[in-house]
Protein backbone atom coordinates (compact mmCIF):
# COMPACT_ATOMS: atom_id res chain seq x y z
CA UNK A 1 0.00 0.00 0.00
CA UNK A 2 1.40 3.39 -1.01
CA UNK A 3 1.49 6.32 1.39
CA UNK A 4 -1.15 8.08 -0.72
CA UNK A 5 -3.56 5.11 -0.72
CA UNK A 6 -3.43 4.97 3.09
CA UNK A 7 -5.34 8.26 3.02
CA UNK A 8 -7.95 7.22 0.45
CA UNK A 9 -11.14 5.13 0.45
CA UNK A 10 -11.37 4.33 -3.25
CA UNK A 11 -13.26 1.09 -3.90
CA UNK A 12 -14.94 1.14 -0.48
CA UNK A 13 -18.70 1.36 0.05
CA UNK A 14 -19.92 3.15 3.16
CA UNK A 15 -23.38 2.78 4.68
CA UNK A 16 -24.25 5.99 6.54
CA UNK A 17 -27.46 6.23 8.54
CA UNK A 18 -29.22 9.50 9.24
CA UNK A 19 -27.38 10.69 6.14
CA UNK A 20 -29.69 13.40 4.81
CA UNK A 21 -28.69 16.24 7.15
CA UNK A 22 -26.39 17.38 9.94
CA UNK A 23 -23.55 15.11 11.03
CA UNK A 24 -24.69 12.22 8.84
CA UNK A 25 -24.63 14.31 5.66
CA UNK A 26 -21.26 15.77 6.60
CA UNK A 27 -19.91 12.23 7.10
CA UNK A 28 -21.25 11.12 3.72
CA UNK A 29 -19.65 14.10 2.00
CA UNK A 30 -16.30 13.59 3.74
CA UNK A 31 -16.20 9.89 2.83
CA UNK A 32 -17.03 10.70 -0.79
CA UNK A 33 -14.21 13.28 -0.84
CA UNK A 34 -11.88 10.41 0.03
CA UNK A 35 -13.24 8.29 -2.83
CA UNK A 36 -15.79 6.06 -1.10
CA UNK A 37 -19.04 4.99 -2.72
CA UNK A 38 -22.07 5.74 -0.56
CA UNK A 39 -25.28 4.14 0.60
CA UNK A 40 -27.33 6.86 2.26
CA UNK A 41 -30.13 5.94 4.67
CA UNK A 42 -32.68 8.31 6.21
CA UNK A 43 -36.40 8.41 6.98
CA UNK A 44 -37.53 11.24 4.71
CA UNK A 45 -37.39 9.75 1.24
CA UNK A 46 -38.08 12.98 -0.63
CA UNK A 47 -35.34 14.94 1.13
CA UNK A 48 -32.99 11.95 0.93
CA UNK A 49 -33.39 11.73 -2.84
CA UNK A 50 -32.69 15.44 -3.15
CA UNK A 51 -29.50 15.02 -1.12
CA UNK A 52 -28.47 12.03 -3.22
CA UNK A 53 -28.86 14.10 -6.36
CA UNK A 54 -26.75 16.91 -4.94
CA UNK A 55 -23.99 14.52 -3.89
CA UNK A 56 -24.10 12.83 -7.30
CA UNK A 57 -23.41 16.19 -8.93
CA UNK A 58 -20.67 16.99 -6.44
CA UNK A 59 -18.98 13.57 -6.70
CA UNK A 60 -19.68 12.21 -10.21
CA UNK A 61 -17.01 9.51 -9.84
CA UNK A 62 -18.69 7.98 -6.77
CA UNK A 63 -21.56 5.51 -6.84
CA UNK A 64 -24.24 6.95 -4.56
CA UNK A 65 -27.34 4.96 -3.64
CA UNK A 66 -30.11 5.79 -1.17
CA UNK A 67 -32.63 3.85 0.88
CA UNK A 68 -35.52 5.54 2.71
CA UNK A 69 -36.26 3.84 5.99
CA UNK A 70 -36.54 4.25 9.76
CA UNK A 71 -33.69 2.29 11.33
CA UNK A 72 -35.50 2.26 14.66
CA UNK A 73 -37.97 -0.19 13.03
CA UNK A 74 -36.88 -3.83 12.83
CA UNK A 75 -38.77 -4.54 9.61
CA UNK A 76 -37.16 -1.59 7.85
CA UNK A 77 -33.68 -2.66 8.95
CA UNK A 78 -34.34 -6.06 7.42
CA UNK A 79 -35.72 -4.46 4.26
CA UNK A 80 -32.55 -2.39 3.96
CA UNK A 81 -30.31 -5.44 3.99
CA UNK A 82 -32.58 -7.34 1.61
CA UNK A 83 -32.23 -4.35 -0.72
CA UNK A 84 -28.45 -4.32 -0.28
CA UNK A 85 -28.35 -8.00 -1.25
CA UNK A 86 -30.58 -7.40 -4.28
CA UNK A 87 -28.34 -4.52 -5.40
CA UNK A 88 -25.26 -6.71 -4.84
CA UNK A 89 -23.58 -3.95 -2.86
CA UNK A 90 -20.44 -4.83 -0.95
CA UNK A 91 -20.18 -2.90 2.30
CA UNK A 92 -16.85 -2.29 3.98
CA UNK A 93 -17.73 0.75 6.12
CA UNK A 94 -20.66 1.42 8.47
CA UNK A 95 -21.37 4.75 10.15
CA UNK A 96 -24.12 4.45 12.77
CA UNK A 97 -25.31 8.03 13.04
CA UNK A 98 -29.06 7.67 13.71
CA UNK A 99 -30.05 9.17 17.02
CA UNK A 100 -32.63 11.37 18.69
CA UNK A 101 -33.50 12.86 22.05
CA UNK A 102 -36.35 13.97 24.29
CA UNK A 103 -35.15 16.36 27.01
CA UNK A 104 -36.90 15.99 30.37
CA UNK A 105 -36.11 15.48 34.05
CA UNK A 106 -35.80 11.76 34.77
CA UNK A 107 -39.07 11.45 36.69
CA UNK A 108 -41.08 13.05 33.87
CA UNK A 109 -40.41 10.48 31.14
CA UNK A 110 -43.22 8.22 30.04
CA UNK A 111 -42.19 4.63 29.44
CA UNK A 112 -42.85 4.84 25.71
CA UNK A 113 -40.53 7.89 25.49
CA UNK A 114 -37.46 6.31 27.03
CA UNK A 115 -38.06 3.02 25.24
CA UNK A 116 -38.19 4.99 21.97
CA UNK A 117 -34.82 6.55 22.78
CA UNK A 118 -33.29 3.16 23.56
CA UNK A 119 -34.67 1.64 20.34
CA UNK A 120 -33.48 4.54 18.18
CA UNK A 121 -30.10 5.25 19.74
CA UNK A 122 -28.89 1.78 20.78
CA UNK A 123 -30.91 -1.09 19.35
CA UNK A 124 -30.75 0.28 15.81
CA UNK A 125 -26.94 0.46 15.90
CA UNK A 126 -26.64 -2.94 17.60
CA UNK A 127 -28.82 -4.59 14.97
CA UNK A 128 -27.21 -2.80 12.02
CA UNK A 129 -23.80 -4.00 13.19
CA UNK A 130 -25.13 -7.56 13.36
CA UNK A 131 -26.81 -7.34 9.97
CA UNK A 132 -23.69 -5.86 8.36
CA UNK A 133 -21.26 -8.29 9.98
CA UNK A 134 -21.14 -10.86 7.18
CA UNK A 135 -20.38 -8.28 4.52
CA UNK A 136 -17.87 -6.42 6.66
CA UNK A 137 -16.09 -9.63 7.65
CA UNK A 138 -15.97 -10.69 4.02
CA UNK A 139 -14.11 -7.51 3.16
CA UNK A 140 -11.29 -8.26 5.59
CA UNK A 141 -10.35 -4.64 6.37
CA UNK A 142 -13.64 -3.11 7.40
CA UNK A 143 -14.55 -0.37 9.85
CA UNK A 144 -17.55 0.64 11.92
CA UNK A 145 -17.83 4.11 13.46
CA UNK A 146 -20.57 4.81 15.99
CA UNK A 147 -21.66 8.39 16.63
CA UNK A 148 -21.80 8.68 20.40
CA UNK A 149 -21.83 11.80 22.56
CA UNK A 150 -19.96 13.37 25.44
CA UNK A 151 -23.18 12.68 27.37
CA UNK A 152 -22.17 9.01 27.33
CA UNK A 153 -18.98 9.92 29.19
CA UNK A 154 -20.07 12.60 31.66
CA UNK A 155 -23.19 14.37 32.87
CA UNK A 156 -24.64 17.00 30.56
CA UNK A 157 -28.16 18.39 30.48
CA UNK A 158 -29.51 16.10 27.79
CA UNK A 159 -31.68 13.93 30.02
CA UNK A 160 -30.62 10.65 31.62
CA UNK A 161 -32.06 8.30 28.94
CA UNK A 162 -30.03 9.99 26.20
CA UNK A 163 -26.83 9.77 28.25
CA UNK A 164 -27.65 6.17 29.12
CA UNK A 165 -28.08 5.22 25.45
CA UNK A 166 -24.87 6.94 24.38
CA UNK A 167 -22.92 5.23 27.16
CA UNK A 168 -24.32 1.91 25.95
CA UNK A 169 -23.25 2.72 22.39
CA UNK A 170 -19.70 3.42 23.55
CA UNK A 171 -19.58 0.13 25.44
CA UNK A 172 -20.91 -1.68 22.36
CA UNK A 173 -17.99 -0.12 20.48
CA UNK A 174 -15.47 -1.54 22.95
CA UNK A 175 -17.04 -4.99 23.01
CA UNK A 176 -17.28 -5.35 19.23
CA UNK A 177 -13.74 -4.04 18.75
CA UNK A 178 -12.51 -7.02 20.77
CA UNK A 179 -15.02 -9.60 19.58
CA UNK A 180 -14.75 -8.82 15.85
CA UNK A 181 -11.04 -8.00 15.55
CA UNK A 182 -10.41 -11.50 14.24
CA UNK A 183 -12.97 -10.87 11.50
CA UNK A 184 -10.98 -7.91 10.20
CA UNK A 185 -13.46 -5.34 11.53
CA UNK A 186 -12.28 -2.30 13.45
CA UNK A 187 -14.90 -0.58 15.62
CA UNK A 188 -14.52 2.95 16.95
CA UNK A 189 -16.67 5.85 18.06
CA UNK A 190 -16.71 9.62 18.15
CA UNK A 191 -18.26 11.64 20.97
CA UNK A 192 -19.35 15.14 19.92
CA UNK A 193 -20.19 18.01 22.27
CA UNK A 194 -22.48 20.72 20.92
CA UNK A 195 -22.42 20.71 17.11
CA UNK A 196 -24.29 23.22 14.98
CA UNK A 197 -27.21 21.15 13.63
CA UNK A 198 -30.98 21.41 13.37
CA UNK A 199 -31.34 19.40 16.57
CA UNK A 200 -29.07 21.67 18.60
CA UNK A 201 -30.53 24.94 17.33
CA UNK A 202 -33.39 25.26 19.89
CA UNK A 203 -31.08 24.88 22.90
CA UNK A 204 -28.38 27.16 21.48
CA UNK A 205 -30.96 29.85 20.64
CA UNK A 206 -31.15 30.58 24.39
CA UNK A 207 -28.42 33.21 24.81
CA UNK A 208 -27.88 32.48 28.51
CA UNK A 209 -27.58 28.75 27.89
CA UNK A 210 -25.20 29.32 24.96
CA UNK A 211 -23.00 31.44 27.19
CA UNK A 212 -22.84 28.61 29.75
CA UNK A 213 -21.93 26.11 27.02
CA UNK A 214 -19.13 28.32 25.71
CA UNK A 215 -17.80 28.92 29.23
CA UNK A 216 -17.30 25.15 29.59
CA UNK A 217 -15.73 24.78 26.13
CA UNK A 218 -12.04 25.74 26.02
CA UNK A 219 -12.14 26.48 22.27
CA UNK A 220 -14.98 28.94 22.99
CA UNK A 221 -17.20 28.00 20.06
CA UNK A 222 -19.78 25.48 18.84
CA UNK A 223 -18.48 22.69 16.61
CA UNK A 224 -19.42 22.15 12.99
CA UNK A 225 -20.71 18.87 11.47
CA UNK A 226 -17.67 18.76 9.18
CA UNK A 227 -15.40 18.60 12.22
CA UNK A 228 -17.14 15.45 13.44
CA UNK A 229 -17.07 14.03 9.92
CA UNK A 230 -13.30 14.52 9.70
CA UNK A 231 -12.79 12.32 12.77
CA UNK A 232 -15.19 9.70 11.43
CA UNK A 233 -13.43 9.63 8.06
CA UNK A 234 -10.02 9.28 9.70
CA UNK A 235 -11.22 6.24 11.67
CA UNK A 236 -12.39 4.66 8.40
CA UNK A 237 -9.05 5.15 6.61
CA UNK A 238 -6.36 2.50 6.13
CA UNK A 239 -4.08 5.00 7.87
CA UNK A 240 -6.04 4.25 11.07
CA UNK A 241 -5.65 0.48 10.67
CA UNK A 242 -4.18 -0.04 14.17
CA UNK A 243 -6.92 1.93 15.95
CA UNK A 244 -9.88 -0.01 17.34
CA UNK A 245 -12.08 0.24 20.40
CA UNK A 246 -11.36 3.96 20.75
CA UNK A 247 -13.65 6.92 21.28
CA UNK A 248 -12.48 10.29 19.96
CA UNK A 249 -14.14 13.26 21.63
CA UNK A 250 -14.92 16.04 19.16
CA UNK A 251 -15.70 18.55 21.86
CA UNK A 252 -13.50 21.64 21.74
CA UNK A 253 -11.83 20.44 24.95
CA UNK A 254 -15.08 20.18 26.94
CA UNK A 255 -14.26 16.84 28.59
CA UNK A 256 -10.84 18.07 29.73
CA UNK A 257 -12.09 21.28 31.32
CA UNK A 258 -11.16 21.61 34.98
CA UNK A 259 -12.06 24.21 37.58
Image: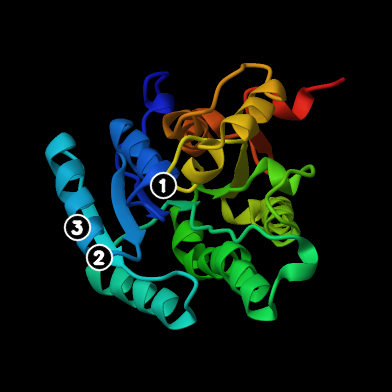
| Element type at mark 3 | helix
The residue that mark 3 highlights is 49
**Which image quarter holds the N terminus?**
top left
How far is the residue under mark 1 from the one under mark 3? 15 Å
- The answer to the question of whether label 2 and label 3 lie on touching residues, with beta carbons closer than 8 A, is yes
Looking at the image, tell me whether mark 2 or mark 1 is earlier in sequence order: 1
Q: Is residue 75 left or right of 253 when viewed as pictured?
A: left
| Residue at x 74%, y 43% (from the top left corner) | 156
| Element type at mark 1 | helix
| Residue at x 42%, y 31% (from the top left corner) | 226
* Coordinates of residue 222 in the picture (x, y in percent): 54, 27
Q: In this view of the protein, can residue 249 be seen by the observer?
A: no
Which of 114/97 is in front? 114
The tally of labels here is 3
Q: Is residue 7 above or below residue 170?
A: above
The answer to which quarter of the image holds residue 259 is top right
The residue that mark 2 highlights is 45
Which of 202/227 is in front? 202
How far is the residue under mark 2 from the one under mark 3? 6 Å
Q: Which mark is residue 24?
A: 1
Q: Is residue 118 above or below residue 32?
A: below
Q: Is residue 66 left or right of 223 when viewed as pictured?
A: left
* Coordinates of residue 228 in the picture (x, y in percent): 50, 34
Other-residue count near label 1 (Cα within 10 Å), few / some / many at <14 / 14–19 / ≥20 = many
| Residue at x 44%, y 63% (from the top left corner) | 135
Amino acid sequence: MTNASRWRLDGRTALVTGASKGIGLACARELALLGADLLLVARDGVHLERVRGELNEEFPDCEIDAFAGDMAQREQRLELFDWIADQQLSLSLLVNNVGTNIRKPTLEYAEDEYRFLIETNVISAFELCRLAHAQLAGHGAAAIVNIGSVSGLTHVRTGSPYGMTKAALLQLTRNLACEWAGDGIRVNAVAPWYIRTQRSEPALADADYLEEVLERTPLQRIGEPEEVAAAVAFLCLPAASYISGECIAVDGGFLRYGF
